[in-house]
Amino acid sequence: EETSWLVPQVDKWLKGVKAIARVAWRYPQTAYAGLVWCLQAEWQYLCRVLPGVGDHLRPIKEALRKEFIPAVLGHKGMVVSDDARRLYANGVKQGGLAIRIPHEQAEALHEVSGQATVELVAALLSGGELDLPSHRRCVKKASSSARDLRIADEEAYLRQLGVKWGKKYEKKFERMEENGAWLTRLPGNFDGTVLTWEDWHDTVSIRYGLRLKNLPQQCDGCRGNFTVGHALTCKKGGLVIWRHNDARDEWEWLCKLALPESSVGTEPFIFYGVGLRAGQEGNGQDSDRGGKEGGNGGGGTGGGARNNIGDEARGDVSARGFWSRRRVCIFDLRITDTDANSYSNRKLAKVLANAEKEKEDKYGKACRDRQRDFTPMVYSVDGIAGREAQNAEKRLATHLASKWNREYSQMVFYVRVRMAIAVVRANS
């Protein structure tokens, strides 16, 4: 009887979940943001301030599982298994979607809230003054401890699920901490972070290994069997060139935001030697290693020594004053499918590091010989940046923070999300 007032409130939330599920079929990114950052926070607040409300939230749990999750994933009639539902409840860095299970976290939220307000409650009961620094330390300690426990539990479950579902998923789960940046930003036209429903459904399906809908039977470029893996690697009818060019254009645009527009260009020449062209032997002269890449540096594999010596090799973007004053930096991008069969037994970090090394061996010396910097920008198809690309993103964020008078941390997040979205958007 004391909690009878909860019934109409839960009914309102239930109707809200069902309404937002209908929206999710056409606008999944907006619906996802509305549920995770708004509607979900309402019943979480109630859990914090009132004990014993978990059982009242079970109808919401069922609506999320049967209606919202299939809609946001773009799979009508999908039956969400217990393992998958627990996975989607994890935080984004722990492989999930942060769509929590309401009744399971209710008591934990209330307990943490009680621990965080010990100093406040004591001051109210005693009628004395509140020691604000002590209260802040209490809140920080309680929230940090709860977050650490939650993360440890979610990471343990992710490892357990990877072993249960097989090596393919185990490899996917290992890199999920780094490939969810596009999920953690509110969609906005001003920031350029809006994904279409096709972009969203394709990207989230690739993230969880779900079957994409409406795939053709054959590749229109090479006539091979058309699969997700084929689309991500085929240079004739796949997305290799499109994906590379989208990421290149995004990086060029970000550089123009941070630096004078006249200092930034695309497809800069990388000279190897006077009178030499790509593919010629160097006649004993020093040369870089690596095979010629298609798409002006957009992909390919390394070759033997003295290949790609020539005066017409090109990078992707040039920026004057990027690393140091009056010095030009050449950027060359590469997007790698880390799930390709040739990488099946290799760790993500090793795949990205080897791709960076190939770029460096190929273009690094030629750039340094002419007093230029060279930075390989290597990304996985799901938006994970290699070490050199991460350093370049941080440097660009420094320029933006200085120019716009904004916090460095905000600019790092902004640049990282923009590049991640540019890569994953081109997977559709």
Image (cartoon, rainbow, N blue to C red):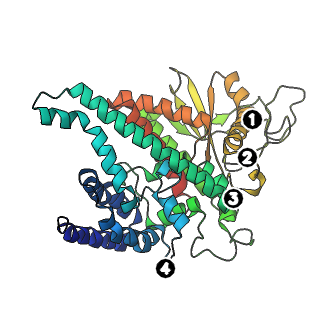
Numbered disc 1: secondary structure: helix
Residue 211 x, y percent position in the rendering = 60, 70
Amino acid carrying mark 4 in the image: Gly
Residue 400 lies left or right of residue 361; in this view the side is left
Residue at x 46%, y 72% (from the top left corner): 70
First along the sequence among labels 3 and 4: 4
Numbered disc 2: secondary structure: loop
Q: Nearer the viewer, residue 387 or 259?
A: 387
According to the image, label 3 marks what residue?
Answer: 168
Mark 2 vs mark 1, CA separation in Å: 10 Å
Mark 2 vs mark 3, CA separation in Å: 29 Å
First along the sequence among labels 2 and 3: 3
Image marks 3 and 1: residues in contact by CB distance under 8 Å: no
Mark 4 vs mark 1, CA separation in Å: 50 Å
Image marks 3 and 4: residues in contact by CB distance under 8 Å: no
Residue 310 x, y percent position in the rendering = 77, 36
Mark 3 vs mark 1, CA separation in Å: 32 Å
Amino acid carrying mark 3 in the image: Lys
Q: Nearer the viewer, residue 82 or 15?
A: 82
Image marks 2 and 1: residues in contact by CB distance under 8 Å: yes
According to the image, label 1 marks what residue?
Answer: 362
Residue 293: numbered disc: 2
**Which is closer to the viewer, label 3 or label 1?**
3
Residue at x 22%, y 70% (from the top left corner): 7
Residue 199 lies left or right of residue 174; in this view the side is left
Residue 166 x, y percent position in the rendering = 69, 60
Image marks 2 and 4: residues in contact by CB distance under 8 Å: no
